[in-house]
Amino acid sequence: MRMTTTRAAEDPAPDGQLSPRLGQLTVAERWRRVRLQAYSWALTGAYRTGAVNPAVWRFVARSYHPLFDRVAAWHARVTCRFTATDVPAYRHFLERNGALGARRLEDFPETTKQNYASVYDEESRCQEGKLYRAGTIVDESSGSTGKPYNWLRGPRELKAIYRSAAGYARLVFPGERLFVINAYSMGAWATGTTTGAAMARIAVVKNTGPDLDKIVDTLEHFGPGFDYIVAAYPPFLKHLRDRLDARGFPWETYRVRGLAGGEGMTEALRDYLEQRFEQVRSGYGASDLTIGMGAETGFTVWLRKRLVTDSELRHHLLGDGEQRLPMIFQYNPLETYLEVNRRGELLCTINTKSCLQPKLRYNVGDEALLHPLPRVKGIIRHDAERWAECLRAMADERMNLPLLFLFGRKDSTISYMGANLYPQDVEYGLYEGNPYAACIARFCLSLEELPGLEYRAAVNIELREDRDLGLAERQELARICRQGVLDHLAKVSRDFAASLKEDPTAADLRVYVFGSGEGPFARASKLKNVYLVKDA
């Protein structure tokens, strides 16, 4: 029977947002809400009770069975149905999309930052439409306009996040005397503050932020008697290695490992870091959702390296014609249920009743593939040598969780030093107050790999066909554009402004000027702009 409802009020809120209120529920709806709540609590309650300790989380990761996928999918569906009766914004969202009576998971519409978080205020997106909870933490992320998005996480939800992150770290980074140096940006950004709190469950933690001098001082002060884990963006780990090398740091007497996140990492950079760090592993998360949605293991690192040279394996796992090399993570569907839509975009449902602002089939804009672990192992097993390598790679962690193949953002953004660079913001910087603006036909973004495994964001500019500038004018155009883009990004993106303060190399933006149809524009369509050059 389709649910009936009292139409939610569409009271305008600040910034044009909608503030729907949960109307009076019918008797049938109240009974349905009670049953769905019981189902949800039975699933999440049992899992939460059994996983209060990171050791139990590791047991689940190692004993995960494909049958749990069905349980996770069912729970995701129950979570969507319960939230429709419990969260005013989501109920109103389903009404507007004609899906209030949806029963199958695929019938619930995708939510995004644009169609949900930007439309409804924070309170209406909370359970029962109530924002206040003592112990709630507010994390922040910046959008393309520089307007911050606030993401609320309640105390029970935070405990679950901390437990999962700590369980993973303890599994991948074993040691008797763990000491975590948290070099992520601090403040309202989720990665830095949450990482510090999570790691405190299993280790001594010092929250230095991305300050090279503080980290060097910390390592030298506490000495080699600890098992160090440095949590940071990948480029920062490279800067740290180079700084320590320049000081003649005695790496051989220390045990230092790296926990990276915030952006992708090439295998070349990993190899460079692991000449000094004992190992470097990445985690996958998003401020919109949660940290620790997925994590690298020894097996996923081996698999990614193998895909570079093994064309048969690449064909079976990535398909024909796919030239990009994805990051590969293992993830727990009992906590974060993942799907891939027809456009190849990743959808996430947080499978827990403790989520203050439920995340339901949320599309963060990343392209991805999903593979069950048994299928991947079956393909690998066809080659005896490959299978022997696989078994060695899986020997330490022995995780049985499914696999996430992540290609990165589909929205033409570049993730650099933890900040997202958006084409529309770059465009402002190129044209605003620029005397050469009339010479620019179009532009595109790329990440440039420099000697020494450094990476820099690059803006590639194409001149109009009728504007052939000389060398001096091209250099002046590049200088003006570089300064304009940096000034605008620092003004509208808090993440980028923070990166500039914390690491001066973030200001090393590259600008290249090409004639019409040259460089990355040689094969570009004249009818539609492509703002992101991949694998440049």
Image: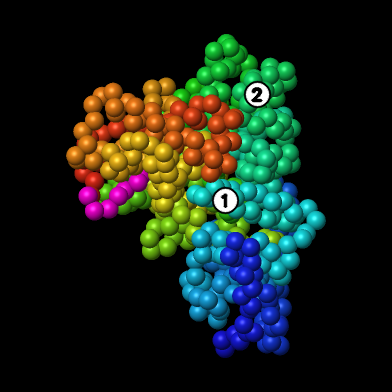
Which residue occupies the foreground of this view, 432 or 268? 432
Whether residue 266 can be seen here: no
The earlier-in-sequence mark between 1 and 2 is 1
Identify whether 146 is placed above or below 509: below
Which residue occupies the foreground of this view, 424 or 7? 424
Name the spot of residue 441 as percent of width and height, x first: 27, 43
- Marks 1 and 2, how far apart in space? 32 Å
Amino acid under disc 2: Ile
Disc 1 secondary structure class: loop
Name the quadrant containing residue 4: bottom right
**Quadrant placement of the N terminus:** bottom right
Specify whether 316 is left or right of 504. left
Residue at x-position 22% and y-position 50%: 526
Region in magenta: 526-532
Q: Residues within 10 Å of mark 1 (few under 14, many from 20)?
A: few
Give yes or no for residue 219 being in the magenta stretch.
no
| Location of mark 2 (residue) | 215
Amino acid under disc 1: Lys
Name the spot of residue 141 as percent of width and height, x first: 59, 48
Identify whether 419 is placed above or below 108: above
| Location of mark 1 (residue) | 147
Specify whether 447 is left or right of 52. left
Name the spot of residue 503 as percent of width and height, x first: 56, 28
